[in-house]
Image: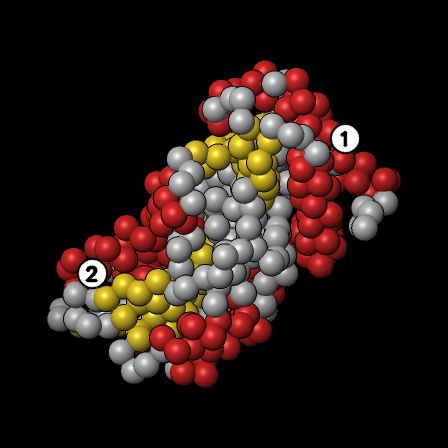
């Protein structure tokens, strides 16, 4: 397999991203480099606010701001009324999870690779509401056992909650197949797409998820402080967000209010309009390139990286699973992960370190305290991967 994009096309992507002139950025699962047009849209709007006023600028750009809902909806094959714009994926996830009316004895099915912030809230619900947590089995390679999952489903199961791509490895969980099981049995399905949105095509109709939570800063290449929540229109009336304001609901009488009929009941009035336009611009930028091609290029570069790492005797690749994405995890036998990250940074190579508490069940089971992570995007190049390998060879 070779580059999906031509050299001239990759050169264009990099010309449209000033950051690549300064760093070899292999930390896209942390926060990707923002395209110039996304950066400029945010800065232009902020300048306009400074000159004309915040409310006045929002009124002037009302149609563009409203169109951002439609752009995001089109990106995941949803309706604009099913989209809520929020500060980040964690807020989106918590708003969705906290709106579910759990009762004592309700069962939540989740995975061993679930992100720490999500699992803390499972434990909070267990303590405060008496829900029961059950872990879906996986095979020796880390793949979710779909047959075992279906056997776990019965009338007390209230929610299946899955992280699509965990932070601690390159595996892509079978989100579509899980959604089919959830739909078959009429169970709510919460899909955390924090690491997958912007990497691979996302279609909520095919995924059959009740909720999808997403961040902007990672593979979508939007600014930090952006994210969104998708809520299937068929279940919105069953849900009550943990807090409301006069944007999420209308105070109709002295003792009566009415929640927003769509997903905007999960928002609040005050938000960053410049970042909203930045997120919308990033989504449009990805759509123009095409998510199928982005996904193929990411897989090509990540597999190139894994193949090169496998040639290094002192390096152990830690990725598991049948289907792998752009997150490449490894550790060096001669240098601790944080020291190695610092050494790479001296060569202007950005990477990250995952710690056990981020995915406690998974990494504790594998006896891993910390690991190095290179997360690769379509604007990266094989030369940048080669630079990473050259530094590792010298350790």
Q: Is residue 255 visible?
A: yes
Q: What residue would you read off at disc 2?
A: 126
- Return the residue nearer the eye: 356 or 127: 356
**Residue occupying the far left of the picture:** 255
User: How many neighbours does mark 2 have within 10 angstroms: few (below 14), some (14-19), or many (20 or more)?
Assistant: many
Q: Pointer 1: what residue?
A: 383
Examine the rendered structure and indicate whether residue 171 appears above or below residue 186: above
Residue 58 % position (x, y): 47, 48
Is 170 located above or below residue 152 in the figure?
A: above
Quarter holding the C terminus is top right
Image coordinates of residue 380 in percent, x first then y, are 71, 37
**Is residue 134 found left or right of 35 in the rendered image?**
left
Q: How many marks?
A: 2
- Any part of residue 5 in sight: no
* CA gap, disc 1 and disc 2: 49 Å
Q: Is residue 163 left or right of residue 39?
A: left
Q: Is residue 389 above or below residue 237?
A: above
In the image, residue 366 above or below residue 349: below
| Mark 1 element type | helix
Quarter residue 174 falls in = bottom right
Q: Residues within 10 Å of mark 1 (few under 14, many from 20)?
A: few
Name the colouring of the figure.
secondary structure
Q: Secondary structure at mark 2?
A: helix
- Residue visible at 45% across and 61% down in the picture: 138
Question: Would you identify the image quadrant in which residue 15 lies?
Answer: top right
Judging depth in this view, the residue of 364 and 287 nearest the camera is: 364
User: Residue 101's spot in the image, x, y percent?
Assistant: 24, 71
Residue at the spot 43% in from the left edge and 72% down from the top edge: 148
- Look at 73% across and 47% down and name the residue there: 300
- In percent of the image, x 52 and y 60: which residue is there? 143
């Amino acid at each position: 397999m070779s580059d999906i994009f031509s050299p001239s096309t990759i050169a264009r992507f990099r010309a449209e991203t000033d950051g690549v002139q300064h760093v070899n950025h292999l930390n896209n699962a942390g926060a990707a480099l923002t395209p110039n047009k996304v950066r400029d849209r945010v800065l232009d709007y902020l300048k306009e606010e400074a000159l004309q006023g915040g409310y006045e600028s929002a009124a002037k750009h009302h149609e563009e701001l409203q169109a951002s809902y439609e752009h995001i909806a089109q990106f995941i094959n949803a309706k604009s009324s099913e989209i809520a714009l929020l500060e980040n994926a964690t807020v989106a996830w918590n708003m969705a999870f906290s709106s579910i009316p759990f009762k004592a004895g309700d069962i939540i099915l989740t995975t061993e690779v679930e992100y720490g912030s999500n699992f803390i809230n499972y434990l909070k619900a267990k303590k405060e509401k008496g829900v029961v947590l059950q872990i879906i089995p996986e095979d020796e390679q880390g793949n979710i056992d779909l047959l075992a999952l279906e056997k776990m489903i019965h009338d007390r199961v209230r929610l299946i909650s899955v992280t699509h791509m965990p932070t601690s490895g390159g595996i892509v969980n079978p989100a579509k197949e899980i959604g089919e099981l959830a739909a078959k049995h009429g169970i709510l399905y919460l899909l955390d797409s924090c690491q997958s949105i912007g990497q691979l095509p996302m279609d909520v109709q095919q995924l059959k998820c009740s909720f999808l939570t997403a961040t902007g800063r990672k593979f979508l290449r939007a600014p930090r402080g952006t994210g969104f929540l998708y809520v299937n229109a068929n279940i919105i009336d069953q849900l009550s967000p943990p807090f409301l304001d006069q944007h999420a609901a209308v105070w109709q009488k002295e003792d009566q209010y009415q929640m927003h009929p769509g997903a905007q009941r999960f928002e609040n009035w005050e938000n960053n309009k410049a970042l909203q336009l930045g997120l919308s611009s990033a989504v449009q930028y990805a759509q123009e390139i095409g998510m199928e091609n982005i996904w193929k290029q990411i897989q090509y570069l990540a597999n190139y990286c894994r193949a090169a790492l496998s040639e290094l005797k002192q390096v152990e690749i830690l990725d598991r699973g049948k289907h792998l994405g752009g997150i490449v995890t490894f550790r060096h036998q001669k240098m601790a992960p944080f020291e190695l990250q610092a050494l790479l940074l001296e060569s202007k190579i950005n990477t990250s370190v995952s710690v056990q508490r981020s995915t406690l069940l998974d990494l504790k089971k594998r006896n891993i305290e910390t690991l190095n992570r290179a997360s690769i995007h379509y604007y990266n190049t094989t030369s940048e991967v080669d630079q990473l390998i050259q530094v590792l060879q010298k350790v």
